[in-house]
Image (cartoon, coloured by chain):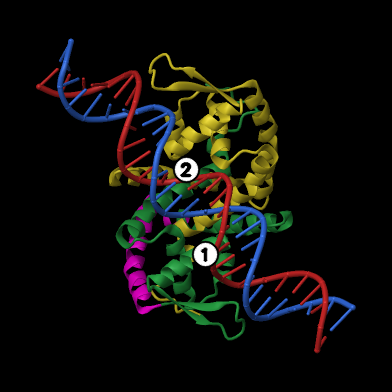
Chain colours: A yellow, B green, C red, D blue
Amino acid sequence: MALTDQHTLQLDGFLPYVLNRLADRVSQDLSQIYATDYGLTIPEWRVIANIAEHETLHARTIVALTSMEKTKVSRAVNSLTERGLIRQQPSALDSRSRDLALTKAGTAMYRKLVPRVLAWEQELLNGLTSGEQRDLLRLVAKLDRRIQELVEESGGR
Amino acid sequence: MALTDQHTLQLDGFLPYVLNRLADRVSQDLSQIYATDYGLTIPEWRVIANIAEHETLHARTIVALTSMEKTKVSRAVNSLTERGLIRQQPSALDSRSRDLALTKAGTAMYRKLVPRVLAWEQELLNGLTSGEQRDLLRLVAKLDRRIQELVEESGGR
DNA sequence: CTAATATAGTTACATATGCAACTAATATTC
DNA sequence: GAATATTAGTTGCATATGTAACTATATTAG
């Protein structure tokens, strides 16, 4: 066993590491629902969920909300449009952008997905008390605000 | 604004979503340290950190610890070996595997990285009380055990 | 002990991704 | 109100990644 000295990182107590590993495992398992059964990639699912939540959105807003690369968003938006799941309309205020909205088919798919995804989340959260669930969400949100400060300070991506 | 009905997912309260977004932002910002200054990719950095913590390890153990794809680990291990940062020795017990260890150069790089990475973590955790920090690590660890149960149930990857 | 099965790790190929350069439009500055 | 700088989104290209097939070794069953 490695000695526990101040020169050795304890990975299990190192937040970026444990956070990423957890997020990865969660995403991986959850994605089986929308990937296997609906042929959606993770970026596509995120785009759909964001549009659904806000009714209508510009691509750049999705970029801001998710921190996904704009090329990732662009490609997801285009493939979803080709598949008839979202619809694009010229924006009145800025003709570089288009208003994105779900089509009937997109809404239908989303409506079928939501309960399954929520049920899956419930299973994940099974072991936590509702207090712990609240704490976790609160702490994650707090850290998220903090990391965005740090990113802005250092120049952002 | 979208109505808040039971058919619409509230993404900011949906754990898989907020968890991933946070983990991504954290990774992205942290990686500037080892990517820009040391030319390490995220998988390479993880491999180094895991070997450092355990002195010596097989590739398959890294796969188990991190849930990274075995091809990802394989490629990271090989590129690190080529760069002279880790060393491979035939394993006494299983000749399919090799014992992986850091070289002098690898250890030196790791030693230089650790304090910087810890300082960065400290900045991130700035806004949380030490109680909140403990809670967060505890909850993440708990969820991590839970997600691994779920993965095993459903067949694993 | 041999045959069948499983495991560690690599490779090949197809797909996904990120960055930089680009087009088109909008904002800003003088 | 041109000229300049920014911004939204796309495309090209190089790199990273995941899946499946493969090699070599270990393990298990009979």
Q: Which residue lies under the disc numbered 2?
A: A141
The residue positioned 70% from the left and 31% from the top of the image is A112
| Residue A93 percent coordinates (x, y) | 39, 15
Q: Does A145 sit above or below residue A61?
A: below
- Letter of the chain that mark 2 sits on in the rendering: A
Viewer-nearest residue: B50 or B73: B73
Residue A7: image quadrant is: bottom left
Viewer-nearest residue: B95 or B40: B95
| Element type at mark 2 | helix
Q: Is residue A9 visible?
A: no
The residue positioned 52% from the left and 37% from the top of the image is B12
Q: Residue B73's mark?
A: 1
Please give the range of residues in magenta: B103-131
Horizontal side, residue D8 vs residue A118: left or right? left
Q: Does B83 sit above or below residue B157?
A: below
The residue positioned 44% from the left and 34% from the top of the image is A63
Near mark 1 (Cα within 10 A), the count class, few <14, some 14-19 or many ≥20, is many
The C terminus of chain A, quarter of image: top left
Indicate which label's residue lies in the foreground, 1 or 2. 1
| Residue A40 percent coordinates (x, y) | 61, 38
- Letter of the chain that mark 1 sits on in the rendering: B
